[in-house]
């Protein structure tokens, strides 16, 4: 699937001087080096293309944009793979509810997402694969799991047998009751008759009347399960194991637990590190499609909001923070943008040297992508701007993605 055009990322002085980029790993709940090697591989789960792109989505994708920018500045090559869940229960339900063809909804919303990501200067995935595009690889993977005795049929569906994976549950480390609750709440079917274990996730959904279905070979006609889609797309885009699997906090369980389990059983390992962004709330609840309390990037842009103001508003909060959006965030960000823009036009000789800002922004990102600390460094410089404003402009562009 076509992604979008990458924003230019300027090379900064003393590139590679940064400390290793450490991020919070959801599994060990500790700071770990995100990618020790010369190449950094990232799988960040993509959108389910309806109600795209709300500020919650943007908040999460911004975290992984910062991670890539820190890696690039450290001199690493970055390979970023993502998906579009362009067939899945919620998408089909929304298409039915709004009387549109699910294919049209997916295409239109995917294009809106591209436009929003471009406006926000997010780096695009090198490989961006739709669930529909992944079906041949999913059929092959599910067939292999069945042949290995790690999957089984229930009526026309196929489920993974989690007892085949001794390491299942080690990604999130949740207890059984928590897992069962979250599984039911987030698309699972623990009470489905015929399953060997309540948490076993669907790998392949047999054809249902009124639903799209594809040739599944020996599996019979149907469509892919959610978790196996990401396991296969990450494997095919990055190889196994890869460095970071990422998403919003709601993906830790069941989605990343299950997709990691599938990747493990397909052979080759899985993500070394699991990184999750805090969920953005609005009007007292997590911003979510089901509740409809959404603030859309495209609506803000259509109302004349500078995309760099949106980006700065999100950067003012640490990526793991759970916080509530208010429109006041935009005013604060706009004033900050105005101060920075004015400062680069009026540098003075006795102000703070630009090289210190660059060092501090670099160090902030290396410390679990601490954007608020990075903004504070630029604020200090803007209050008393020294020379070499072009170094500050380049650092703010390359590391924070904000074009002044
Ligand atoms: N309120 C929110 N705050 C922060 N991130 C959010 C919020 N709502 C959704 N996200 C994140 O945005 C990304 C896309 O969400 S999504 O459109 O529902 N799509 C999916 O979760 C699947 N297509 C992943 S394979 C996910 O990482 C999700 O965790
Ligand atoms: Zn996913």
Image (cartoon, helix red, strand yellow):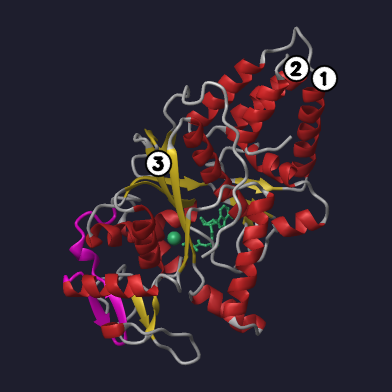
Q: Where in the figure is residue 280, as x and y percent of width and height?
A: 61, 50
158 or 220, which is in the foreground?
A: 220
User: Circles 2 and 1: CB distance less than 8 Å?
Assistant: yes
Q: Residue at x 69, y 51 (%)?
A: 119
Q: Earlier in the sequence, mark 2 or mark 1?
A: 1
Residue 140 coordinates in the image, percent (x, y): 28, 73
168 drawn magenta:
yes
- Which residue is most to the left? 148
Q: Residue furthest bottom?
A: 209
**Above or below — where is 253 with respect to 36?**
below
Where disc 3 sits, the SS reads strand
Q: Where does the image place residue 108, in percent across and percent down from the top left?
A: 65, 71
Pointer 3 residue Cβ closer than 8 Å to ligand 1? no
Along the polypeptide, which appears first: circle 3 or circle 1?
3
Mark 3: give few (<14), some (14-19) or many (20+) Cα within 10 Å: many
Q: CA distance from mark 3 to mark 1?
A: 38 Å
Specify the quarter for ligand 2: bottom left
User: How many numbered circles does the render carry?
Assistant: 3
In magenta, the rendered stretch is 148-169
Picture quadrant where residue 370 is located? top right
Whether residue 386 is situated above or below residue 71 in the rendered picture = above
Distance, label 2 to label 1, CA atoms, is: 7 Å
**For residue 385, which numbered disc appears in the image?**
2
Task: Determine if the magenta segment contains residue 82.
Answer: no
- In the rendered structure, find residue 40 and report the number of the disc placed on it: 3
Residue position for label 1:
346
Decide which of tag 3 and tag 2 comes sooner along the chain: 3
- 343 horizontally vs 145: left or right: right
Query: Which residue is painted at 60% across and 27% down in the image?
Result: 373
């Amino acid at each position: 699937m076509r992604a979008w055009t990458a924003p230019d990322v300027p090379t900064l002085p003393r590139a590679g001087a940064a400390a290793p980029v450490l991020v919070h790993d959801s599994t060990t709940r500790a700071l770990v080096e995100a990618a020790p090697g010369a190449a950094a591989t990232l799988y960040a789960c993509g959108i389910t293309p309806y109600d795209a792109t709300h500020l919650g989505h943007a908040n999460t994708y911004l975290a992984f944009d910062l991670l890539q920018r820190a890696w690039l500045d450290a001199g690493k090559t970055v390979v970023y793979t993502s998906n579009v869940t362009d067939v899945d229960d919620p998408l089909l339900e929304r298409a039915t509810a709004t009387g549109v063809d699910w294919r049209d909804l997916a295409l239109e919303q995917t294009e809106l997402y591209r436009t929003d990501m471009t406006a926000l200067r997010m780096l695009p995935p090198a490989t961006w694969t739709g669930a529909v595009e992944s079906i041949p690889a999913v059929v092959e993977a599910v067939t292999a799991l069945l042949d290995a005795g790690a999957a089984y049929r229930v009526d026309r569906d196929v489920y993974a047998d989690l007892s085949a994976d001794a390491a299942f549950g080690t990604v999130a480390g949740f207890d059984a009751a928590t897992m069962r609750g979250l599984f039911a709440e987030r698309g699972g079917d623990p009470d489905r008759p015929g399953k060997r274990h309540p948490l076993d996730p669907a790998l392949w959904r047999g054809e249902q009347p009124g639903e799209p279905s594809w040739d599944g070979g020996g599996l019979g006609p149907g469509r892919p399960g959610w978790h196996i889609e990401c396991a296969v797309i990450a494997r095919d885009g990055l190889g196994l194991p890869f460095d970071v699997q990422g998403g919003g906090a709601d993906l830790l369980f069941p989605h990343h637990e299950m997709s990691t389990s599938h990747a493990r059983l397909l052979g080759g390992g899985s993500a070394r590190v699991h990184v999750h962004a805090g969920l953005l709330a609005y009007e007292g609840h997590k911003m979510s499609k089901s509740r409809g309390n959404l603030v859309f990037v495209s609506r803000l842009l259509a109302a004349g909001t500078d995309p760099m103001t949106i980006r700065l508003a999100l950067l003012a909060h640490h990526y793991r923070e759970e916080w509530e959006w208010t429109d006041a965030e935009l005013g604060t960000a706009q004033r900050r943008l105005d101060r920075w823009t004015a400062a680069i036009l009026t540098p003075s000789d006795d102000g703070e040297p630009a090289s210190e800002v660059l060092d501090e922004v670099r160090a902030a990102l290396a410390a679990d992508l601490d954007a608020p600390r990075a903004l504070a460094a630029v604020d200090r410089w803007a209050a008393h701007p020294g020379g070499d404003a072009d170094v500050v402009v380049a650092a703010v562009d390359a590391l924070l993605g904000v074009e002044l």
